[in-house]
Image (cartoon, rainbow, N blue to C red):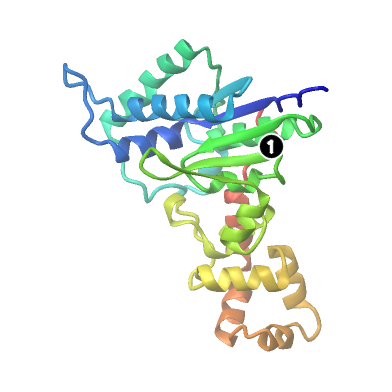
């Protein structure tokens, strides 16, 4: 009788997103000398939880850098709606490197790219290793586009530090009504206020979801809309003339927003 071999697991940490969420969940934490420590406490707690829950053989931390990325070069307004990062959080983002070093966790970062791009790239590099489970630990939903069946999952904070949820492909479909691949199409239509990605002004969550579940990806939506008799098919599906007008006028915005929302897999 052979015991079932443990599935080797790689955890990819979206350091910025986790530190950010922890900082806002624990704003009043400080050391005896008054140094703010909420984000550091949160990231350490999450690390210990990840090690306990997933027993990973490998962990890597991915970092954002202060320099502009290719998204900022393509779109000056990218993330411009965000308020300036608190000094107290910046010091903790830098201090967190010491925590990763003490845990022996390597840090990946690259000028011109975001942590998400490095996560997407590493997850993509492992795609031929079917026996490896990849868990992306993140604080935001952007990384859901990387989910691949049960091979690549996203472990994220719902609220606070202890309320977590794991998304495999089925969980993404259950929550959004479409699969991981369509997360970027959704952002193309709906936009993403947190990153200042415009989408098509006037198209909200419900309409974006209906369009995607009825007609498919952004490319398929426009292919079907621009085909002979396409508008009638949209009207028959209950899409209002106003929305059809927005789609036609907003095609460039939608395609550009999808590009901004797409996590790169070639960042190394």
Judged left or right of residue 38, residue 225 is right
Measured as percent of width and height from the top left, residue 241 is found at 59, 87
Measured as percent of width and height from the top left, residue 12 is found at 58, 30
Which residue sits at x=67%, y=69%?
213
Kindly indicate the quadrant of the structure image that contains residue 151. Answer: top right
Measured as percent of width and height from the top left, residue 169 is found at 67, 50
Query: Relative to the observer, which residue lies in front, 55 or 176?
Result: 55
Q: Secondary structure at mark 1?
A: loop
Q: Can I make out residue 29 in this image?
A: yes
Using the image, determine if residue 77 lies above or below residue 224: above
Q: Can I make out residue 74 in this image?
A: no
Q: Residue furthest front?
A: 1
Query: Relative to the observer, which residue lies in front, 37 or 87?
Result: 37
Q: Can you identify the residue that label 1 sits on?
A: 265
Judged left or right of residue 79, residue 134 is right
Which residue sits at x=67%, y=30%?
122
Measured as percent of width and height from the top left, residue 219 is found at 73, 64
């Amino acid at each position: 009788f052979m015991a079932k071999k443990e599935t080797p697991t790689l955890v990819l940490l979206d350091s910025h997103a986790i530190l950010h969420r922890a900082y806002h969940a624990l704003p009043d934490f400080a050391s005896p000398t008054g140094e703010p420590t909420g984000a550091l406490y949160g990231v350490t707690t999450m690390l210990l939880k990840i090690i306990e829950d997933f027993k990973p053989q490998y962990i890597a931390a991915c970092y954002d850098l202060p320099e502009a990325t290719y998204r900022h070069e393509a779109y000056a307004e990218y993330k411009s709606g965000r308020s300036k990062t608190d000094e107290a959080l910046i010091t903790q983002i830098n201090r967190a490197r010491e925590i990763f070093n003490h845990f022996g966790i390597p840090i990946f970062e690259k000028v011109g790219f975001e942590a998400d791009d490095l996560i997407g790239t590493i997850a993509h590099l492992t795609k031929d290793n079917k026996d490896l489970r990849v868990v992306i630990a993140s604080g935001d939903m952007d990384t859901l586009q990387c989910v691949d069946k049960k091979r690549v999952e996203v472990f994220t904070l719902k609220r606070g530090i202890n309320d977590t949820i794991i998304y495999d492909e089925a969980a993404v479909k259950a929550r959004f009504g479409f699969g991981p691949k369509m997360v970027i199409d959704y952002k193309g239509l709906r936009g993403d206020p947190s990153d200042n990605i415009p989408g098509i002004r006037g198209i909200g969550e419900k309409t974006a979801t209906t369009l995607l579940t009825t007609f498919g990806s952004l490319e398929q939506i426009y292919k079907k809309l621009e085909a002979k008799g396409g508008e009638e098919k949209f009207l028959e599906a209950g899409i209002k003339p106003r929305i059809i007008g927005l789609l036609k006028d907003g095609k460039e915005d939608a395609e550009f927003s999808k590009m901004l929302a797409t996590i790169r897999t070639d960042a190394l």
